[in-house]
Amino acid sequence: MTVSSAPGKVYLFGEHAVVYGEPAVPCAIERRATVTAKARDDDRLRVQTQDLTLDGFSVEYGDGVLNADVDVPRPLVEAAVGYVDGAIDQVRDVADENVGFTITIESDIPLGAGLGSSAAVVVAAIDAATREIGIELSPTEIADRAYRVEYDVQDGQASRADTFCSAMGGAVRVEGDDCRPIENASRLPFVIGYDGGTGDTGALVSGVRSLREEYDFAADTVRTVGDIVRVGERALAEGDIHKIGQLMDFNHGLLSALGVSSRSLDAMVWAARDADALGAKLTGAGGGGCIVALDESPSTATALSYTPGCEEAFRAELDRDGVRVEA
Ligand code: PMV
């Protein structure tokens, strides 16, 4: 039995624009998905999970039949199983044989809410299952294989941001296929607000694409997000946390202009700013899910927890550890 974990992430800057070749800076956070892999005598895959959103399910998925003894929306179960199934396909590709596993997932990362939950599960699953059969992959190889899984499951609409960040940990820079860690990133005291919902990433990405094709302002806005990322990278290297916060505010305004914010995300962003956070923005695809604010003091998390529309608020520092073996 092998246990590995991998972190979720927030976008400090650059979601959506990254789809059009602009740089983005995702940052790993101290919220992890933990995956246990146990090799089986047969070639089947059994997946079990209990997490915040899925209330626990158990499926047998090896003969093309999905039997879930669950009371959660079927698409969510199928998506979760699809990611694990894809991860195990990668492991079988590395092993060059049809190995079977029982996979158990525990996660404290809200699902589908802009915190990279699926990437963390895929990264941890590839690491745990390969180690279980005596193979050790490098974090960059795990990132690459996890990206292929996300790309397939999300019908080609995935950047490398989530999977690279989760495998490597810390703050990273992603620009097309060029992914690299940002060394010496300053401390980042994140506060996260979660509205309990999810955004439809495919629909939101398509919406921005249409807007960009129809209006020059939208194409300019995407380029301006890229400018913010470039300035933000310098602020991160200099440890200028006030400037980072200001740039997060700018980035949120531009994402709103692109139509990907929502009433609850805006309410949480403003609650964080009113509580003197240094800056706040939505993270990920938008439409619902999470915001990320920057604040040294506990006041932002407290203010968020009293904000209508906020289901959960928590602090999470930048996590410098990427994927790691736990047992
Ligand atoms: O919501 P998430 O964490 O899956 O992030 C989506 C980010 C986008 O830039 C909108 C799409 C992508 O794959 O980069």
Image (spheres, rainbow, N blue to C red):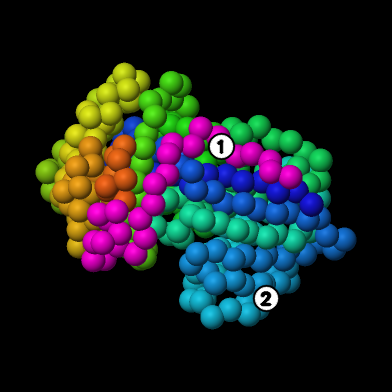
Image height check: is 210 above or below 327? below
Element on which disc 1 rests: loop
* Residue at screen point 51% across, 56% down: 108
Residue 280 x/y as whole percent: 24, 44
- SS for tag 2? loop
Is 145 drawn above or below residue 63 in the view shown?
Answer: above
In-image side of 286 versus 60 (left or right): left
Q: Residue 49, position in %: x, y?
A: 62, 65
Quarter the C terminus occupies: top right
Image: magenta residue range: 302-327
Q: Earlier in the sequence, mark 2 or mark 1?
A: 2
Q: Residue at 19% of width from left, 34% of height from top?
A: 246
Q: Quadrant of residue 13?
A: top left
Residue highlighted by disc 2 = 65
Q: Is residue 115 left or right of residue 136?
A: left
Magenta includes 317? yes
Measuring 77% from the left and 39% from the top, which residue is drawn there?
135
Q: Which mark is residue 322?
A: 1
Crowding around mark 1 (Cα neighbors within 10 Å: few <14, some 14 to 19, many 20+) is many
Cα distance, mark 2 to mark 1? 34 Å
Crowd around label 2: few <14 · some 14–19 · many ≥20 (10 Å): few
